[in-house]
Amino acid sequence: MTTIPVKKLLAMVLALLLVAAAAGCKGKPADLLSSATFEESGGDQSDIDVSETGQLGSDDESTAQTVSNGAGSTSSSNSAVTVTPPEKTVQMKIGSVWGNVEYNRPAGFSAQSDAYTKKIAEILTKYNVQLKIETITSTSIDIIARAIQAGDVPYDMMEMHMVDARNLAMAGALYDQKSIRTLNLSAPQFAANKAIMEDVTFNNKIYASRHGFPINVVNGVFINTDLLKKYNQPDVMALYKQKQWTFQRFRDICKAVSRDTNGDSQNDIWGMAASSGVEGLALSANAGGTVTRRANGEYFVNMTSQAGIHAYEWLRELYHTDGSFYRATSPSDGYKMFQDGNAAFLPGGLIEYVSFSNACDFDFIFLPFPIGPDQTEHIIGAYDDKVFCMPKTIKNADLLGQVYAELSTIDLDGVYRKQLKNGGFEDSALDVIMTLHKYLSPEFIGGIKLPFNDNMRNSIYSQNGSPATVLNSVKTQFDKAVKDFYANVKG
């Protein structure tokens, strides 16, 4: 009678659970990874032999590749290392949280989907690798983690929220992309995302990456330029180019445009409309972030620093002292206020333009959040984005690296620029937008649960609130929460 090893059996069960989760779960906000942890060493590579001559061997000759370091070789990864395509077609799977939203669409439905479909066909021809993109859900990340723990390879590569990838990396479940010889993460297509990769780097190992313009993480302010002209306000684009787009100028403009137009003693026009989220943008702009990591590896809570307090006090002045800040009850409430032409500024993520731009009958632009009084340059916190990562159990890292390097050559910048132009942005505004990634700064708050979050926010909006008092009172607890969260990094 043939017996199945416990480890193999567990992997089979977890794989079935993964399929069930992908089929039955709706997309929900990602939860923290559970307590599953992993050995610090990489995945089992016992069936792969890399010889001194660069020959990569495998028990299955269909997956054997030759690694070349010779002069004159070319690679989409901008690396000197390439692989010779296997003789038999290799099947590889990518699990993406956005699998059937941004990929696998009918021809002509989505420029991004079309670009990936074309590139996948090229990869089959060039490398004899058949790629398949499947949908996973944020709620199945824990199942994926347990499958990797059992030694399984649920997917060759995964695309997920940065917060989820960070949790997997911290648990030691991901492969160090920096060690893949066919993948050059310093190549131009990855250059715009250094801050994002830093967010998922531990012990000098890069566990996730992103290529192309990071449209999902760039945040700032949408600006109704027609409204500013109507009330004789400065050209904000000119202020930005002169490095005079500051907290003070922002506040001055907000006060100048806010007004009661119908005599009911309530504002009808507001300087800024914003829901929750503006606090993080202000913290990044003035304090450098909520939680950051110093060069020595120490995590620092910027939020409770003096610069963090200043950011909160500035918001409080806009809301209480000036009465120029419309506090939206939800993002959609803020969008409506802006699209109706009743707010000059709408802070948020660039990608949010899809929620309201088609309803705007006025000109608008997008700029980074203004420079805080404690800074000399703009700062955009890299709170979350899409990233690609690989389970530590992958077997053919060099071939996978070559395939990923090829995928990364898709002109996503061109795709996004076209989408933004269709959304109402003019070329001159787009020229600025497509450079904003230079202000991105790593942000390490994601996943940390803070029981005193409401107290901190209320210090801005409650009538008798005091940011300095509240933030100073939670400093010790905040520091401990961050220290405990990052105390057991396995990666």
Image: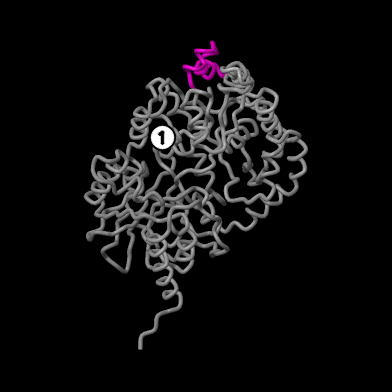
Residue 83 higher or lower than 377, as above or below:
below
Give above or below for 84 relative to 148. above
Q: Quadrant of the C terminus?
A: bottom right
Q: Which residue occupies 53% across, 64% down? A: 38
Q: Is residue 380 left or right of residue 78?
A: right
Q: Residue at x 67, y 44 (%)?
A: 454
Q: In the image as oriented, which residue stretches furthest toward the bottom?
A: 1
- Please state the horizontal and vertical placement of residue 427, each as a whole percent of the image: 37, 22
- As drawn, is 398 to the left or to the right of 161? left
> Given the image, on which type of amino acid does mark 1 rest?
Val
For residue 453, what is the image quadrant? top right
Residue drawn at x 50%, y 42% as measured from the top left: 196
Q: Is residue 329 magenta?
A: no
Magenta residues span 224-244
Which residue does the numbered mark 1 point to in the structure image? 354
Quadrant (top left, top right, bottom left, bottom right) of the N terminus: bottom left
